[in-house]
Image (cartoon, helix red, strand yellow):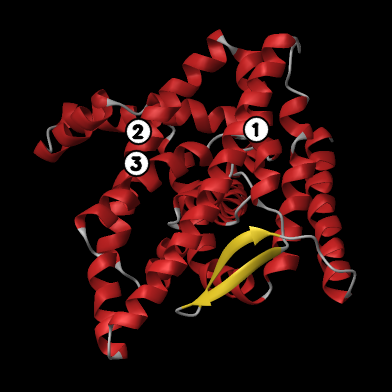
Amino acid sequence: MNYVILIVKGFLIGLANIIPGVSGGTFALILGIYERLIRALHNIGVKTAQRLLAAVTLKKTAISNAVLELRRIDFGFLVLLGIGAVIAVVATSKLMIYLLNEQHDPTYGFFSGLILASIAIPAKLLKGFGWKELLALIAAATLTIGLSMSMGEKNLEKQQQKQSLEAKESSEVASNDAVVISRFSVGKLAHLFLSGAFATSAMILPGISGAFVLLLFGSYFDILTAINNRDLFVLLIFAAGCGIGLLAFTRLLNYVFEHFYSLTISFLIGLMVGSLYGLWPFRKYEIIDGERVDLAHIVPEVNVNLMVTGVAFLIGAGIILTFSRFERN
């Protein structure tokens, strides 16, 4: 039964990580496994690789050391969480593309409710709040808003480039070929690698959405499409970035929590506050190659869409509050 529970928890964390604005780290915190997860990831290092590779010789001592190393890094725990997370990503990737393209405003309203209610979780962890913590919060919020505005400018450039391409190309086939070549360029793959490193780092932090980071990097739909199309090459490049970012960042995370605990928590809260700007549901947009490209924030009209989005917001906030109540109990 414990195995099933861990897989379910992994599923919830994986589901959170695929949703822009929701933090897998927050769900790990709510589910009571955050510290164990960070400790297990932090324990993985060069010694782990050495002992596991030595076991290939099939020597009794080497195998025994490998087994002890797997226990030290809590391997079974990580595997079960990983199984649940992978199931969540594979099962919901198509649904997320549909919701973000076809039900954009209510979906982002739901995300906004999730992230706004989640702010209370790291806030409760603060041991003190002074001017330094306030500056850290403001700096983080400013950074996130700046990144969101930058992404909007990149989307506008993407629209202009697409329109220019369509004007020059005489056939739809030629246009599609240009898109394919661009998709698999060295620069694009390097971008996906870095996106994976930064997104995975964000995924393990309470309050920071890895999927939102992918949206900021402009890689979110690329990764979901690669998952749906079983594009193993693209996914391997992305996974390599994820692995390196995960192992490197857990060490940094341990350090800053040990030496700058309240400042770190305040910075996380600032990132969450700033992310609400990027999750504003109501946008001016264009449809390019069947993909919605958001261009600018707008003030919503009072209509059915606003009401549905408001209800979705309340549902999202209610889910987080319900999880928080379970965590307290």
Looking at the rendered image, the disc whose residue lies closer to the viewer, 2 or 3, is 3
Q: Which residue is mark 2?
A: 70
Q: Position of residue 217 (x, y in %)?
A: 45, 50
Residue at image position (37%, 36%) is 245
Q: Nearer the viewer, residue 70 or 147?
A: 147
Q: Report if residue 215 is visible in the image.
A: no
Quarter that holds the C terminus? top right
Quadrant in the picture for residue 8: bottom right
**Crowdedness of circle 2 by 10 Å Cα count: few (<14), some, many (20+)?**
some
Tell me: residue 139, above or below residue 99.
Answer: above
Q: Which residue is mark 3?
A: 243
Q: Position of residue 289 (x, y in %)?
A: 45, 79
Say which element carries label 1: helix
Q: Amino acid at mark 3?
A: Gly
Q: Position of residue 301 (x, y in %)?
A: 85, 68
Q: Amino acid at mark 2?
A: Leu
